[in-house]
Amino acid sequence: MTDELLQVLWIIERSLAMAPELSANLDRIIQSPLFTAAELPEPEEAERESPSEAHPDQVPLDLTAAK
């Protein structure tokens, strides 16, 4: 087996081991006070538009780079 496959299997194994704890946390979250979409502020029109250009601090992501 490759190291990558072993890592995937270990992640799956750990995730399954965590299932009872995760389920209990989800139940606790669902039973806690929640807010509705109506309670959230409405965005301004400018906030709804996509950015016209990249932020100067952003680093471009090269998806063509091979590993």
Image (tube, rainbow, N blue to C red):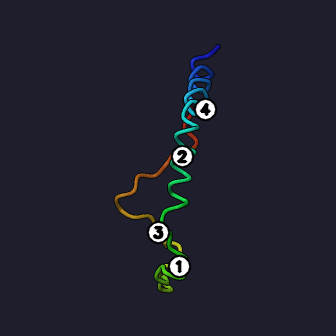
| Element class at badge 3 | loop
Residue 28, relative to residue 33: is it above or below? Answer: above
Q: Determine the CA span between mark 2 and mark 4.
A: 14 Å
Question: Total of numbered circles in the picture?
Answer: 4
Q: Determine the CA span between mark 4 and mark 3.
A: 42 Å
Q: Nearer the viewer, mark 2 or mark 1?
A: 2
Q: Label 3 near label 1: C-beta < 8 Å? A: no
| Element class at badge 2 | helix
Residue 5, relative to residue 52: is it above or below? Answer: above
Around disc 2, counting alpha carbons within 10 Å, would you say few (fewer than 14), some (14 to 19), or many (20 or more)? Answer: few
Around disc 3, counting alpha carbons within 10 Å, would you say few (fewer than 14), some (14 to 19), or many (20 or more)? Answer: few
Q: Which residue is mark 4?
A: 16
Disc 1 residue type (three-letter): Arg
Residue 60, relative to residue 6: is it above or below? Answer: below
Residue 63: x %, y % from top left? 56, 44
Q: Nearer the viewer, mark 2 or mark 4?
A: 2
Camera-side residue: 51 or 6?
A: 6
Q: Determine the CA span between mark 1 and mark 3.
A: 15 Å
Residue 10: x %, y % from top left? 57, 24
Q: Determine the CA span between mark 1 and mark 4.
A: 39 Å
Q: Which residue is mark 1?
A: 48
Q: Nearer the viewer, mark 4 or mark 3?
A: 4
Disc 4 residue type (three-letter): Leu
Around disc 1, counting alpha carbons within 10 Å, would you say few (fewer than 14), some (14 to 19), or many (20 or more)? Answer: few
Disc 2 residue type (three-letter): Ala
Q: Which residue is mark 3?
A: 53
Disc 3 residue type (three-letter): Glu
Q: Which mark is residue 24?
A: 2
